[in-house]
């Protein structure tokens, strides 16, 4: 997902896989292996010994253990060091994948590993729960959310933050269209509350020189379907679009460390906000197409299943019922696979309909 | 290389990596791991248990051991079996990667492993040396080459063959523009003879019902540079283009086992020939662009190297000389990396200038 999304925006990608799985974990079952910290480090050493580390941007996502997170962090630190004489020449986008929906789905020791890395990143992409873990603030309102982003800027000195998945209990929400977002977790964890909301929103901020938050909010209509990999898609498109926003529209930032806009730039004029507009426009269009294709595929499965089926012929009635249900669940996951390949043009040429709005708490 | 090339032609790709290397082997050094046969098998089992094996085409390339080749073969056999009730619904493109330029660069036991698999493939893509290994015929002339292709059709019953890398000693060649081709081997093995030729050619054949060869030849101007990964690029584009040629231009073949054209179709009318025309057109255009970018990059390196260099400051003169030469060699490899991402449109929209010609021995 991430590799093709970046390639579609013209990035040459060196993909260092931290897991080698047969399928995404949204299926509820998978086979394969996880990369060890040593394997990750060795691959980077291989790049280094052949002068292949002249990267402009690093995007890091899920790593399967605390030592793997540390290995990824060491790569980031080496790349930063190499670029230290040329401010703005290297940028690290870190997605601190730890959990979602109030639940940590990595080993507990991954959390402190990320906490010690975040201060070296240029942009982080936590969801609501990860924002809570990093800030120590339980997010129960939009005011809380702003506080959490401010705390993250101040605690970690991380200049850019996008909170990609906010989901507030309806009664505490400050507006009728309370905000929720896409998620990298499995569909079972999407609560009924979330499903009742009808917009998808993200919050972003580039800190000012006093490390205060400069927040914008962007909402797009929500699609009633769980898609897997949208977090990776968001991060990957952000890599291409943020770089583009800086290079095309704010060239002075190219040689500014971490591409931090001057204080007089408003939230909605930020390259981060401009990039987010394009990223969410592309994602919304691709997910709309995916949803249509998914519904067609599910309808096709349904008519197939009305026919006699030999696959489970040797099972007892009870076993067959279980097997048929499991197959239906797996097919539903497959039907919702994001249709990226056939919609690459929508990644390249989004039509921006939804604009970032300044968000004063 | 293969994944993006197939995706650019609209294929949804499940990539099962048989090696995890930091870089291609053309650099002369790399780090990383090889997949074991068990890891390959396990990943496929993961796909199978979640109903994710409904593939239309399988493309197989380099596998790092005889047991890995066997594991790949077992996957192919399972996919064939699943599709056996619907002839034409599954197609296996096998690149029998064993060696090049008279040299085997895999373990010796990989050769018999491939020999026992080839008879199950629909299309194989051997280079000249691999054609010799499979046919047992030393290719010293174009007549010999035709014999070797015929022997492969007859021995293995493999319906489609494309010989991707033919290089005849100049004195024995039947024409002034003796044929050579791109190669997947490292640049050091490209002989001086090859560099003196100025065309790049491939030979293809779809067997007739009597298993005789139906040969075509296609030549494009040769670029004076070694590019790595062009064999994978050829195979990947062939997957997309052959399927397109069958589905669009010869729909009756869609339900014909192995998409074998009737005997009355001439060599140049074959879907295999039409596909090869588009594949080589795309490749020629992309490699032309790559060569321009490579020359610019090498010129840039040259001017950098004229400046004082602190990187090797602590080395002795002799050590520095060795280090500078090694760096130059590695940079030359990097400069020639195929510019695929930025030239995806040339993969999608090739301009066919060079046509396949019937080739009667």
Image: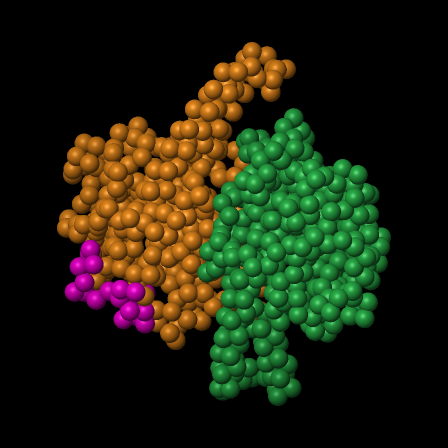
Chain colours: A green, B orange
Instruction: Please state the horizontal and vertical placement of residue B103, each as a whole percent of the image.
Output: 38, 38
Residue A124 is situated, as x and y percent measured from the top left of the image, at 70, 47
In the rendered image, the vertical position of residue B108 relative to residue B240, given as above or below? above
Residue in the image at 45% along x and 29% along y: B297
Q: In which quarter of the image is the N terminus of chain A?
A: bottom right
The residue sitting at 79% across, 62% down in the picture is: A102
Which residue is at the far top?
Answer: B317
How many numbered discs? 0
Q: Is residue A20 visible?
A: no
Does the image show residue A242? yes
Front residue of B313/B157: it is: B313
- From what the image shows, is residue B95 above or below residue A306? above
Expressed as whole percent of the image width and height from the top left, the position of residue A80 reads: 67, 34
Q: Which residue is drawn at 16% across and 65% down?
A: B264
Q: Nearer the viewer, residue B7 or A129?
A: A129
| Quarter of the image that includes the C terminus of chain A | bottom right
Above/below status of B263 relative to B25? below
In reply to whether residue A201 is colored magenta, the answer given is: no
Instruction: Please state which of residues A13 and A90 is positioned toward the viewer in this rendering.
Output: A90
Q: Nearer the viewer, residue A7 or A360?
A: A360
Span shown in magenta: B248-269
Q: Position of residue A276 (x, y in %)?
A: 62, 52
- Give the left or right position of residue A244, taking residue B139 as reference: right
């Amino acid at each position: 997902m991430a590799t093709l999304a970046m390639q579609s925006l013209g990035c040459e990608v060196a993909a260092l896989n931290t897991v080698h799985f047969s399928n995404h974990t949204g299926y509820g079952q998978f086979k394969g292996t996880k990369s060890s910290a040593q394997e990750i480090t060795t691959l980077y050493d291989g790049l280094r010994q052949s002068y292949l580390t002249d990267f402009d941007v690093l995007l890091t996502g899920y790593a399967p253990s605390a030592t793997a997170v540390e290995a990824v962090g060491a790569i980031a630190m080496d790349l930063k060091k190499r670029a230290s004489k040329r401010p703005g020449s290297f940028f690290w986008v870190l997605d601190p994948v730890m959990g979602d929906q109030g639940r940590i789905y990595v080993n507990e020791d991954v959390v402190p590993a990320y906490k010690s890395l975040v201060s070296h990143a240029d942009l982080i992409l936590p969801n609501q729960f990860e924002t809570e873990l990093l800030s120590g603030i339980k997010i129960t309102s939009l005011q809380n959310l702003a506080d959490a982003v401010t705390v993250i800027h101040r605690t970690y000195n991380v200049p850019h933050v996008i909170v990609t998945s906010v989901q507030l209990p309806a009664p505490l929400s400050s507006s009728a269209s309370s905000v929720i977002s896409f998620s990298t977790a499995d569909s079972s964890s999407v609560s009924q509350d979330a499903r009742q909301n009808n917009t998808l929103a993200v919050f972003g901020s580039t800190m000012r020189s006093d490390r205060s938050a400069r927040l914008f909010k962007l909402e797009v209509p929500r699609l009633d379907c769980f898609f897997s990999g949208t977090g990776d898609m968001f991060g990957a498109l952000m890599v291409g679009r943020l770089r583009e926003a800086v290079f095309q529209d704010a060239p002075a930032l190219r040689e500014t460390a971490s591409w931090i806009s001057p204080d007089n730039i408003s939230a909605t004029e930020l390259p981060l906000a401009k990039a987010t507009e394009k990223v969410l426009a592309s994602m919304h269009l691709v997910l709309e197409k995916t949803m249509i294709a998914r519904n067609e595929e599910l309808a096709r499965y349904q008519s197939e299943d009305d026919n006699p089926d030999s696959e489970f012929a040797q099972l007892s009635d009870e076993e067959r019922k279980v097997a048929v249900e499991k197959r239906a669940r797996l097919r539903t996951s497959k039907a919702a696979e994001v249709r990226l390949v056939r919609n690459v043009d929508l990644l390249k040429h989004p039509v921006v309909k939804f604009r970032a709005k300044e968000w004063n708490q």
